[in-house]
Amino acid sequence: MPSTILAIGTKKGLWFATSSDRKTWNVSRPHFLNEEVPSVEFDTRGGRTRILVGIRSEHWGPTVLHSDDLAETWSEPDDGAIRFPEDTGEALGRVWQLKADTEGRPGVVWAGCEPISVWKSTDGGEHFELNRGLWNHPHRKDWGPGYGGAAAHTVLPSPVDDSIHVAISAGGVYRSTDGGESWEARNKGISAYFMPDPNPEFGQCVHKIARDPEEPNTLFAQNHHGVYRTDDAGDHWESIADGLPADFGFVMLTHPRRGGTAWVIPLKADGERVPPEGRLAVHRTADGGATWTALDAGLPPEEFNAVLRDAACVDDGDPAGVYFGTRGGSVFASADEGASFAEVASRLPDVLCVRVARVGD
Amino acid sequence: MEVSVLVPALLAEHTGGQRILQVVTDDVASVGNVLDILAGEHPVFDRRVRDETGSVRRYVNVYIDGDDIRSLDGLATPVLEGQELLIIQSVAGG
C-alpha cells in the first residue's frame, strides 16, 4: 500500500513517521540515537528509494550513510563519503545538506557542508568530490559563520540547464552557470544590516533559498531579516516581506508544481527568534509574495520554539503536503497545502531537518 | 613488538565486535603508527577516532598506560613493548 514516509532528523537521532493518508502517523524507533542528524534526503530517482543521512557525533565526528531498504540497514564506505583532500588541511565538520539532483542527472547528489564547501557525488551519494571552484573562490576567506556555524546549507541544481545556486551562511547566494566550475555572488538587493555596508556584494546571511517550479529563474529567499524573490536567477532580488508579521525566519519552501506559491514560517526579530507573540503560523503566498495568508489551523495556540532552515519540506502530492518540526520536538503535517495541520510527533529532541517521500506506488 | 588497544564499546561495531585489539608493530613505534596499523584493518573505526587530517578528534582521548597522549607527545608519543593503549570518549555533549 502506498504510504508517505517522513524523515525527522533531530539533535539526538533520526525518526521516521509513516502514513497512508498523511493525517494519521506511526512513528518509528529512533535511529542513530544520541547522534545529531542535520541532513537527510530521499533519493527516489530510477524507481529506487535511497535514504541518505548526514550524522554527527560529538565524539566520533560526522559521516554520511545510506540505506536502500527504508532504514532497515545502513551502509557507509570504508574511506568515508566526504573527506577533505589532504591539500586543504581541513576536516569535515558537519553535513548540512544532501540534495539529490534531477531525474535527468541520475546518480548525482550534492552536499553542502561545514566548513563552507559544496560537494558532488556521481554514485548516488556514496563518494563525494569537493567542488574546487567554490573552495578556491577569492571570497571564501571573507565568509564568516552565522550563529549555527559556517556552512553551505542549500544547493539548488537547475532542472533546465547547468546552473546551480548555493546559499551560504554567512556568505550569501552564489550562482554557477557552468555546472559548478565557476561561481559568482548574486546578492544584489539582499540586505546585510549587520555589516558596515548593508548592501555588500557578498556576506549576507541567507537562511534558505527555494526555486519556483514553473519559472526556473525565479527563486525565493528567507534572509537573516528579509524575504526576497528574484526573477532573473539572482541578478536582482526584491523584497516580498510586506504582509508578513516578521521578516526573520529560516524556512523557505516552494510548491512542487505551481509557480508563485511559497511558504515561510516567520520568527520575531533577530533578538527573540520565536514565533511572533508566541503564535506559530505558516504563511503562504500564491502570487509570488505580493500577498501572504497566515495558516495556523491545528497548530498549538502558544509556541515559543523556532523552526530551523531544513526542518520544513513539501511533498509532491496533490494537494501538496507541508511538513515542519520545531526546536521543541514537535512535528506537524498538512495534507492540504497548509490549510490545516495535524501533529505527527511531539517531545522529540530539537528537530533539525525533515524530508518526505512517497513509497510503495 | 605487540601492544594492546582497548576500544570503547560504542566503537566495537567497527572492530568486528572486538574490545581488545592486539597490534604488532615495529620495535620502534609511536601511537600514530599503532593507529595507522589499525586503520588498515578497521578504516571506519579509524575515522571515528581521527579526522581526515590525521588528528585525534577533539572529544576522543587516547591514553598510553594511563597517561593522556595530549600531555605527552601526541601521536608521536613512543609506544613500548607490552604497553596498553586506551581509547575512550571524553565528557561532551548535552
Image (tube, coloured by chain):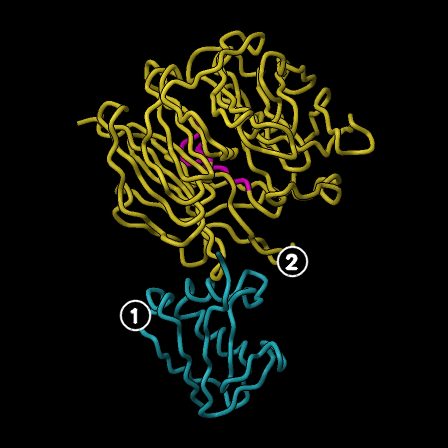
Picture coordinates of residue A32 (x, y %)? Answer: 36, 52
For the magenta stretch, what is the residue range? Answer: A99-112
Three-letter code, disc 1: Gly
Residue neighbourhood size for the residue with mark 1, other residues' Cα within 10 Å, grouped as few (<14), some (14–19), many (≥20) = few
- Rendered cyan, the chain in question is B
In this view of the protein, which residue sits in the foreground, B34 or A245? A245
Please give the chain letter of the residue carrying mark 1.
B
Residue A235 image position (x, y, % from top left) = 69, 18
Looking at the rendered structure, whether the residues under marks 1 and 2 are on a common chain is answered as: no
Q: Is residue A106 magenta?
A: yes
Can residue A104 be seen at all in this image of the molecule?
Answer: no
Mark identifier at residue B17: 1
Residue A298 placement, left or right of A196: left
User: Which color is chain A depicted in?
Assistant: yellow
- In the rendered structure, the residue with mark 2 lies on which chain? A
Locate residue A94 relative to residue A227 in the image: left or right.
left
Q: CA distance from mark 1 to mark 2?
A: 32 Å
Task: Report the residue marked by disc 2.
Answer: A89
Disc 1 is placed on an element classified as loop
A292 relative position to A229: left or right: left
Q: Let me know if residue B35 is in the magenta part.
A: no
